[in-house]
Amino acid sequence: MDWMTWYNSLIKPEWTPAPKTIGTIWQILYPVILVSFGYVFIQAFKGKISWYVALPFVINFVANVLFTPIQFGMRNMPLAALDILVVWGTIIWCMVVTQPWYLWVMLAQIPYLIWVSIATVLQISITLSN
C-alpha cells in the first residue's frame, strides 16, 4: 500500500489538517528555517558564536529530516512520535541559546514552534489511536 493510502487509513482526530494544508505550511516554514539555521551555522563556522549555540540547530535539522522516512517509509508511529518530540524540544533549545546573540533568529522560530507544537499533538494523538 502506498504511503497516502496508509496515512488515510489511520484513525486521526477530527481537526487533522488536510495533507495539502500540511504541505503548504511546510513550504512557508522551510525558507524561514533555511535562512535562520543557515545564519547560525555561518556564524559558528566563522567563530562568532560557539558551536554549543549551533548544536540544537544541527539536532533539529537531523530530526526534522528523519521524520518523513520514519513516519511514512518505516511507518513506525512510536518512533515518529519520539522524533517529533525531539524536533519540538530542540526548537525551544534553539530559541533559548540564540536569544542573547541573535534575537531575530529566536523570533523567526516562533511560527516553527507553533506549527510543530500542533504537529506534535497530532502525531501523539494518531500514535495512541492506532
Image (cartoon, rainbow, N blue to C red):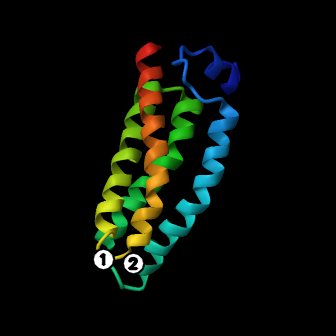
Residue in view at x 54 percent, y 26 percent:
75
Q: Residues within 10 Å of mark 2 (few under 14, many from 20)?
A: some
Residue 69 rendering spot, x and y as whole percentages? 56, 38
Across and down, in percent, residue 35 comes to 55, 68
**In the rendered view, does 53 fall on the left or right side of 74?**
left
Q: Amino acid at mark 1?
A: Ser
Locate the N terminus and report the quarter of the image it occupies.
Answer: top right
Q: Residue at x 38, y 71 (%)?
A: 103
Q: Can you tell which quarter of the image residue 34 is in?
A: bottom right
Nearer-the-camera pick, 101 or 54: 101
Could you say which is closer to the camera, residue 78 or residue 20? 20
| Label 1 packing within 10 angstroms: few (<14), some (14-19), many (20+) | few
Residue 42 in the image: state x and y as whole percent: 47, 78
Of 110 and 58, nearer the camera is: 110
Residue at image mark 1: 50
Circle on res. 92: none
Residue at 59% x, 56% y is 30
In the image, 114: left or right of 27? left
User: For the residues marked 2 and 1, what is the alpha-carbon distance in whole angstroms?
Assistant: 6 Å
Mark count: 2
* Label 2 vs 1, first from the N-terminus: 2
> Measured from the top left, where is residue 117 in percent x and y?
42, 40
Q: Residue at point 44% right, 71% down?
A: 104
Tell me the quarter of the picture where residue 60 sits.
bottom left
Type of amino acid at the residue the image marks with label 2: Ala
Instruction: Relative to 95, say whether 90 is above or below.
Output: above
Query: Element type at marker 1?
Result: loop
Q: Is residue 28 left or right of residue 101?
A: right
Q: Is residue 53 above or below residue 56?
A: below
Q: Secondary structure at mark 2?
A: helix
CB of mark 2 within 8 Å of CB of mark 1?
Answer: yes
Which residue bears the numbered disc 2? 44
